[in-house]
Amino acid sequence: MTADIAENWTAPGLALQLLGGGLIVDAVRVLPAAWASRRWRQAEGRILAAEYMAAPTGGEGPPLPALGVGLRYDYTVGNRRLEGNRVSFAGYAPTSGGVVAVRRRYPPGAAVTVWYDRNAPENSVLEPGMGVGLWGELAIGLALFLAGSALRRAT
């Protein structure tokens, strides 16, 4: 029994399983809120800021391309003014094009519809639901996990 385990314990297979498992856990963690957000209440809001976030350079070399958009919006629930920063549960492509597209959709000062959880109004999103990005993360995680399992069995 111990010899079988030792023979199948390959570092690359294990690395793929751990990476895939991490992606699966991250996607599953977000799924309930993403699913529920389709039924959340709506409030009118306004974009406060949409700034490009660049990778830190450590003081050496040229600045790196933008990694994301630091988006902030406000909205009111009852008499309470709240701020949020989540665009969607699906995320967006971490490419220059994806970052620019998000910033163009949500320029500072723009009026937006904010979806919020009535039981916890501080939880909000601009684009409710699960979207392709979340399903993609789950699919890639599963594929990596299965590939790692196959690799470990093949040794």
Image (cartoon, rainbow, N blue to C red):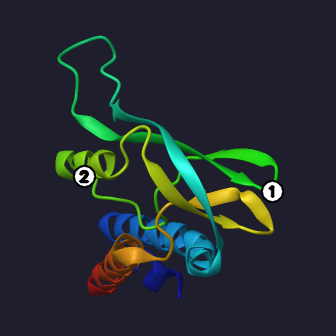
Give me the residue at 50% from left, 60% from top.
Answer: 126
Q: Do the residues labelled 2 and 1 touch (CB within 8 Å)?
A: no
- Mark 2 vs 1, N-terminal side: 1
Give me the residue at 18% from left, 50% from top.
Answer: 97
Q: Which one is in front, 100 or 28?
A: 100
Residue 61 visible in the snapshot: yes
Q: Mark 2 points at which residue?
A: 101
SS state under label 1: loop
Compared with residue 20, is residue 79 higher up or lower down, i.e. above or below? Answer: above
SS state under label 2: helix
Q: Which mark is residue 50?
A: none
Q: Which one is in front, 44 or 131?
A: 44
Q: Name the residue under label 1.
A: 78
Compared with residue 43, is residue 135 higher up or lower down, i.e. above or below? Answer: below
> Which quarter of the rendered picture does the C terminus lie within?
bottom left
Q: Where is residue 13, by image quadrant?
A: bottom left
Tell me residue 27's x, y (percent): 50, 71
Q: Decide if residue 80 is on the left or right side of residue 89.
A: right
Give me the residue at 38% from left, 81% from top.
Answer: 142
Q: Which amino acid does label 1 sit on?
A: Gly
Label 1 crowd (10 A; few <14 / some 14-19 / many >=20): few
Q: Where is residue 30, by image quadrant?
A: bottom right
Q: Which one is in front, 101 or 154?
A: 101
Q: How many numbered discs sit on the rendered protein?
A: 2
Q: What residue type is labelled 2?
A: Ala
Tell me residue 35's x, y (percent): 57, 81
Tell me residue 108's x, y (percent): 41, 37
Tell me residue 7's x, y (percent): 38, 78
Residue 10 visible in the snapshot: no
Compared with residue 139, is residue 120 higher up or lower down, i.e. above or below? Answer: above
Label 2 crowd (10 A; few <14 / some 14-19 / many >=20): some
- CA gap, disc 2 to disc 1? 32 Å
